[in-house]
Structures are given as C-alpha cells and as structure tokens.
Image: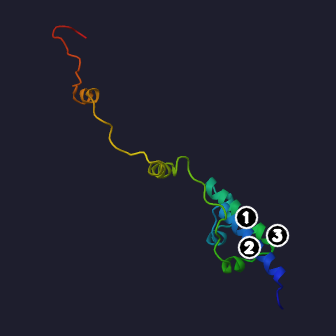
Amino acid sequence: MTIGTAQMKAQAAAVTEVQTLMHKHGLTLADLLAIGGRELKSPNPKTCEKARRVEKAWELMARLSVNFAHLENASPYTPTRPARRRCGEGVFLQAAENTGVSGIASSLPESNEINELADFTPVASPEIKPGVAP
C-alpha cells in the first residue's frame, strides 16, 4: 500500500508537533520509555511533573496517530526560533564592536597636574591621640 504525499506531509507535521512538545517540556525519547504511571505517585514533585509531561506527550501521539517508531526514524528536531538570551548576554560583544566602528580611539587620558596629584596623594588614617579614650 502506497502512502500519498498528502499523507506523508500530514505525518511529518504530526511528528514535528510531537517533537516540539517534547522539546518544550525537556523530554527525550528515553524519557518516553523510562517514565511511567508509577512516577505520577512519586513523593518527589519534579518526578511527578515529568511523568505528567510524558503522559501529555503520549496523549498527543495517540491523538495524532504518531507511533514511537515514527519519532525514532524522524530527523532530529531543530527549533525554528533561536534560544532566548539571558538579560545582559551579548551586550559586551556589541559594545566592543561599536567602539571599533565609531572611530573613537581608546587611548589613555592626557595627564595633567590634578591627575598626577590624585595618584600620589597619600591616604592618611585618623591618628589616635594617646590618653584620649574613644
């Protein structure tokens, strides 16, 4: 029996949807096999949550008629959107690129009398006078 191209496209879309759900919930194919119903009653909340996610993945597979073998034979899932950055990531790289483009020379400031005095002025600590109680 031959499968038509429309059926193949629908099957591929269903497999991609299951892979998207698995990626979103941090599941692997091994998780689908290893985690079962007894983990739903686990005292560990993380284990229970992972078991619920596995259960949702199996329900979606049943609803879309996707076999486990289809997931094994499918090409690896590659997300279409890039991963989210953490706050502040990439800022320093961008700043370094901008200074090179703007033409601002990154040289040391010219020395003057005030800068020289600030460098050589000793920092005095308060002297303790003998005989005076703090």
- Tag 3: amino acid: Arg
Rendered position, 113 above or below 130: below
By what rule are the colours in the image chosen? rainbow
- Tag 1: amino acid: Glu
Residue 93's mark? none
Closest to the camera, between mark 3 and mark 2, is 2
Instruction: Tell me the SS state at disc 2.
Output: helix
Label 3 or label 1, whichever comes before in sequence order: 1
- Mark 2 crowdedness (10 Å alpha carbons): few <14, some 14-19, many ≥20: many
Q: CA distance from mark 3 to mark 1?
A: 12 Å
Instruction: Tell me the SS state at disc 3.
Output: helix
Label 2 or label 1, whichever comes before in sequence order: 2
Front one among 69 and 86: 86
Q: Is residue 130 visible?
A: yes
Name of the residue lying farthest toward the front: 103
Residue 55's mark? 1
Q: Is residue 37 visible?
A: no
- Tag 2: amino acid: Val
Which residue is identified by label 2? 15
Residue placed at 65% from the left, 71% from the top?
A: 77
Which residue is identified by label 3? 63
Indicate the quadrant containing the N terminus: top left, top right, bottom left or bottom right: bottom right
Residue placed at 20% from the left, 16% from the top?
A: 127
